[in-house]
Image (cartoon, rainbow, N blue to C red):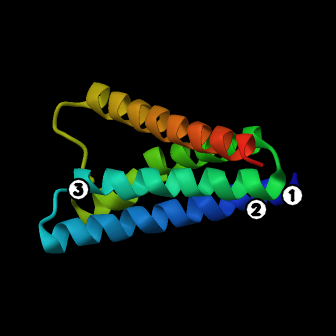
Amino acid sequence: MKVFVRYVFTGAVLVVVLDAIYAALSLYSHIAYAWFTLPQMAFYAILAWIVTRNLANWRAGAATAFIVSIVEATLGWWVSALIGPGRPPERGAVMLVSGALFAIALSSIVGAISAGLTARHM
């Protein structure tokens, strides 16, 4: 359990740092912030792969991706909004919540698929 918590904490810190880097890159290079969804999904796949391989448990890999995605959809988006490109749309709370739920779902699905494929080939 202690190792699992360490993976979750490390993943959460990394995802917030990545959000800040992506927001700064988007701001200064004029690349659309949405393009950074692709490397972010790769991050979740790699995170789930590492956790599944090291703990020999696909559920731990999938759970790590899910928990870290919640951190990204809250704290990570707040950090990117402070920088600029992650600022929520003017359409209100419904768009913000639905966007966060979609991001959590997508990241969790990518993590679960990665964890499942990793466990299958162990």
Residue that numbered label 2 is attached to: 6
Residue 63 - label: none
- Find the residue positioned furthest to the right: 1
Q: Mark 2 packing: few (<14 Cα in 10 Å), some, or many (20+)?
A: few
Q: Residue 82: where, in percent of width, then height?
A: 30, 62
Q: Residue at x 72, y 40 (%)?
A: 120
**Residue type (three-letter) at the residue carrying disc 1:** Lys
**Residue lying at 73% horizontally and 50% vertically, measured from the top left:** 52
The answer to which of marks 1 and 3 sits earlier in the sequence is 1
Give the amino acid at mark 2.
Answer: Arg
Element at label 3: helix
- Label of residue 33 in the image: 3
Q: Is residue 18 visible?
A: yes
User: Given contact means CB atoms under 8 Å apart, are the residues at marks 3 and 2 in contact?
Assistant: no
Q: Residue furthest left?
A: 30
Q: Spatial distance from mark 1 to mark 3, Cα to Cα? A: 35 Å
Q: Please state which of residues 97 and 113 is positioned toward the viewer in this rendering.
A: 113
What residue is disc 1 on? Answer: 2
- Circle 3: residue type: Tyr
Of 47 and 81, the residue lying toward us: 47
Please provide percent x and percent y for residue 73.
44, 45
What is the distance, in whole Å, between disc 2 and disc 1 at their CAs? 6 Å
Nearest the viewer among 39 and 88 is 39
Are there few (<14), some (14-19), or many (20+) residues within 10 Å of tag 1? few
* Residue closest to the eye, 44 or 14: 44
